[in-house]
Structures are given as C-alpha cells and as structure tokens.
Image (tube, grey):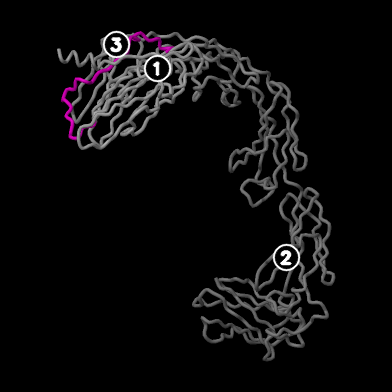
Amino acid sequence: MKLKLLLLMSLLFFVEIGFAQNTVTYSSLTNTINVNSGVEGTVDILVNCYGNSSTQVFLDALQSCGNNDGILSTSYTNGNILIPRQNTTIRYKFKKTVTIDTQIVYKFSTNGSCTQAESQMIKITVNYKAGSTTTPTNPTTNVIDAGDKLTIDESQEVVSIWGSSMPGYSYSWQIKKENGNWVTIPNEVFSTYNGLFYTGICTYRRGVTKSTITSYSNEITFTIIPSPIINNSINFNTSGSGIIGSNPSGGRINSYQYSWVLRGGLEDIVFPDATGQNLEFPSWLYSPANENLKATTGLYVIRFVKSGSQTLSSNLLKLEPTPTVQNNAITLNGSTISGSLPTGGNGTYEYSWLYTSEEIGTFEFPEVGQNLELPSWIYNPNLPINVYQGVTVIRVVKSGNRSVSSNTLKLVPFPATENNTITLNGSTISGSVPTGGNGIYEYSWVYTSEDIGTFEFPGEVGQNLQLPSWVYNSNLPINVYYGMTVTRIVKSRNRPASSNILKILPLSSNKIALNDAAIQSDLSVEELVTVYPNPTSGSINFSTNFSTDKQIEIILYSEKLGNEKSVYKGTVTPNQVINWNIPASYQKGIYFYKILSGNKEFRTGKIIVQ
C-alpha cells in the first residue's frame, strides 16, 4: 500500500499553457530532490509545443522568485523559442554546503514575472542532507511518465517521456518493438527522453545505475503511426546542368534522406555522393571517355526519399541529350592558338585546353578561354615539356551534357635565330639585327675570362653594348689584359642563339704594364699565354701566341706544395702549346702560376685542380 502511494505521489502531471493557437506543456510544475551537502543536484522539466500556428512561443521560466541560495545554474537545453512539434528541457542545478539537514523551496516564474500566480510557477523543493543519503538498491522513485499522448504521428511529433530525478544515478533508455527484445537506445543518457526509434507499437523504459546495480522504471507503450511521404517530384534546372527536386513532406518529422539513381542501362547506377535534395550532373555522365554512360536516349533519373519507415520514389526524368557540339577546330598563329566558335550543345560553352608530351603525359593549361596564348615556358628547352620535345594541344568544349575534343595540334618551334653577329668599334660592340624566331628579340651579353669564368653584363639588354670602363682596369681580376671575350645571346620564343665570340683588345691609349703581372716591354697583348682547361683534373695546357721564339719559365706554387715548382723552362716557338701532366700526388685545390721571361713576370694566374 505504501509503495502504491509512493508511486502515485511520484507520478508527474502535465500543465498546459496556451499561446494563441499553440500550446506548451510542462512535464511537472512541482518537484522534490534530495542532495548531499556540497553535491550538485539537477531537475529537468520537459517542455513540448503543440498546435498548428507558425507563431513562435517564447519561454521565460528562469526567473527565481524567492530564495536564491543554492541555485547553481538555470538553462534551456534546446533554446527557449519553440514552434509546434519542438521541445526543450529546462535544467535547474542546485548545490549548497550544509552542516544540518536543510530544506529550501525554490519558485520559478513561467512568464518572467514574480507577480504570476504561484499555481502557475515551477516549484522545486531541495532537501540538502548534511550526511550521506542512502539510496535503496532497488529505488522505488525511478518513475517515468508521458501523459496521455500515447498515440504519435511520426510526421508531427516525437515521443516525449519525463523521468523522475535520481541524483547519484546514471541513466539509460531501452525500447522494445512489439514482442521483440529490449534494445538500449544509443546516446540517451539523460533523465528524460525525446525522439523516435521505431514505428508501430513500441514500449519504453528507463534504467538507473549505481555502481554495478541497474534497476528499471515502469514501462510506457506508444503506438507510433507511420506517415506516408508526399510531394517527391523532380525536373531539370534552367541551365540543363542538373535536376531540381521538390521539398517533400510527411514521413518522419524533419528527417529526409535522398538518393539518386540512373536507370535504363544494364543495371541501375547510384550517383555516388549525391545525397542532397537536388542533383548536379557529374562529369562522368557526359565525358567522352564514357560513351556507354553518356546521357543519351533511353536513360532516366529517379530520386528516392526515405523518412522514418517510409520510402517514396519520384517521377522518372528522361535525359534528353543536347545536340552534339560541332565546329571545334584550333589553328596555330605564331604563339597564339585560335579556336573556332562552336555550335550545337545548349549554346553555352566551357573551354579547357590540354597539352600532351609523350614522355610526361597529359596536363591541363589553366586558361579557359576560346583562344589560347601559349605561355613562354613552352619554348624553354631546359624544361621537361617544351616544343622541342614534341608537344600537342587539344581544346575540349563542354556544353550542357555534351563535350567534344578538337583536332590535335602539334606545336612547332619558331625558326632558329640567325644573323646574330657582333663587331668591336672602339669601346662599342655593335650587334646585327637578327632574323628568325617570332620577330621579337631579347638580348643578353656575357663575358668570359679564362681565370674567372663566364658572367653576364648586368642590365645590358640592348642590341648593342657599350663596354663599361672597368674592363680596362688592370687592377681588377677581369680585364682586357687577361684575355676577355664577349658573346651576345638572342632569344625569340625559340632556343637561345649565341653570336660569334669577340676578343676584347685594349684601347691603344691603354697599353700599360700591369703592376702584378709586369708585361715585358717587347711583348704585345697579343703575345700573352692562354691556359686551359681550367678547372682541370689531369693535365693543363699553356698555349703561346708569340710571334718569335721566346725563352720562358713556368712556375707553379701553393700552400700545399710549400716550395715553388718549375714545370717548364726553355724556348718556345710561336703558337707552341706546352702540356704539363699534373702528378697524381697533387691534392685537389687552387694552385697559382707565374710565367717569366728574361727574369721578369709577365703573366700570373691560378689553376683549379678537381
């Protein structure tokens, strides 16, 4: 008898408050919980909204009217604005440290005003226990209630079950389909339950667990009425690039799953990743590489909508192919590929350009216009893809669900640059006007010193070159007295072309002796010695350019040798080449040489041994 009375007292009732044509219900306006001193306690109150008006209901149930001592927080789990078939939970949390058992009654207005009638307020009695409270192993306060709404239309509302607060316990919810077995509902770990799991006759119960002991509440059985899906139709969008699907209704409340199927071939083909309300035609549907799947006569598209226990198929939409794209031809004009204006399709054209190299493969230019200006890198022979390696280009035109490739165009290099000669006039090097290429020429000038190497004259990009004054400075490591040559490089969208090699001679007014390499008075600049190859690894040549026999000595020295080494001493004839094999014992590095004649140095330099 006492157990029945306790259950009756614990059963919760629903209170309805109307807002225009909509109504909200509170799972309970009166609640009592026991919490230990310093331990947090929670009371959840479920609020459901019913009606047929689009007017929003604004909840204002967090205003405390009275004692606030011990109120930890107040909140809505799903916001405080509801429309029909929505719900939220008002969550009140309490925590207070007491030395003796203390009872506090809290009152919360449901309209935001403390002048509200107390009968319409939410009243929560919290018994703060100074000592440890003992919860029965099989608690009799584990009670759930759903009011009188036990028949649910899945298109309009969800199952809403309120459960008594059980501080210190963890919650779980189970469902049983008609005469089936109990199944735990995943992720449902709160004192209340809101949702749909099955249709038909379903029974729910709540489990509460403490330590390893779980007990279950009373059972509530719902009849959930399946709702048929309506309004599933599809049609082409205005551009013909996809399909627009209607907004379905019915089925499970706010829950629709879409799938799209291509029908009419040997078997149905599901459009991968197409799970939205509308469908954008994928590229493979009209790719030239998939003729068997191309949108042609006999293929249809259908949309399936699944909601709850119901699935509905749309109308079949026949894919009527657009006319074949025609007049897609390309021609090469210099470095520009001109493309014709296509016909057919749907009148709107998208262009892409592909280039192919036999060694590298096929890639796409970033350009998307009707014509293509070939980029400069395509003429660079130092890159793996260039016109000298055999490159072909095609244009692909897409229109609606059609695409077509143009003729294949082989890129031909521009004619080689010719007539690239230079002559020295005083301190000015004059260059001829080149021919060949694309008619537009880029110039660069390079100078070479046997001792130092090859460098480019900075900033000199003209047809002619005015030699800078520093080339005549005998104190610099590169100057005309050490044998300087100049070449002009010409580029014109083709392979760079080098001019003749021009040896730079000192001006007649500047024939002076070097401080560091005193030139013998009876030797002219033309009678210097050329040293090559440099760097070297095996031997070195000293090529003379004397007009008469001369007595010379060649001496090699470095930090590694310690002492000077005479590698040649004797008489040389005009244009004689002296070859000296470098001993294997010589380490790699830099060695210096000097050439003497008549006990005077007239040439010094360095040799790099690799």
Q: Residues within 10 Å of mark 2 (few under 14, many from 20)?
A: some
- Which segment is the magenta one? 128-156
Sequence-first disc among 1 and 3? 1
Q: Which residue is mark 2?
A: 457
Q: Quadrant of residue 375?
A: top right
Q: Is residue 504 above or below residue 436?
A: below
Q: Which mark is residue 48?
A: 1
Q: Please give left or right for residue 292 compared with residue 420 in the image.
A: left
At x 60%, y 41%, the residue is 358
Quarter holding the C terminus is bottom right
Sequence-first disc among 2 and 3? 3
Q: Which residue is mark 3?
A: 221
Secondary element at image label 3 = strand
Sequence-first disc among 1 and 2? 1
- For the stretch drawn in magenta, the main secondary structure is loop
Question: Percent x, y for residue 500?
Answer: 77, 63
| Mark 1 vs mark 3, CA separation in Å | 19 Å
Amino acid on which disc 3 is placed: Thr
Amino acid on which disc 1 is placed: Asn
Q: Is residue 464 above or below residue 42?
A: below
Question: Percent x, y for residue 464?
Answer: 81, 62
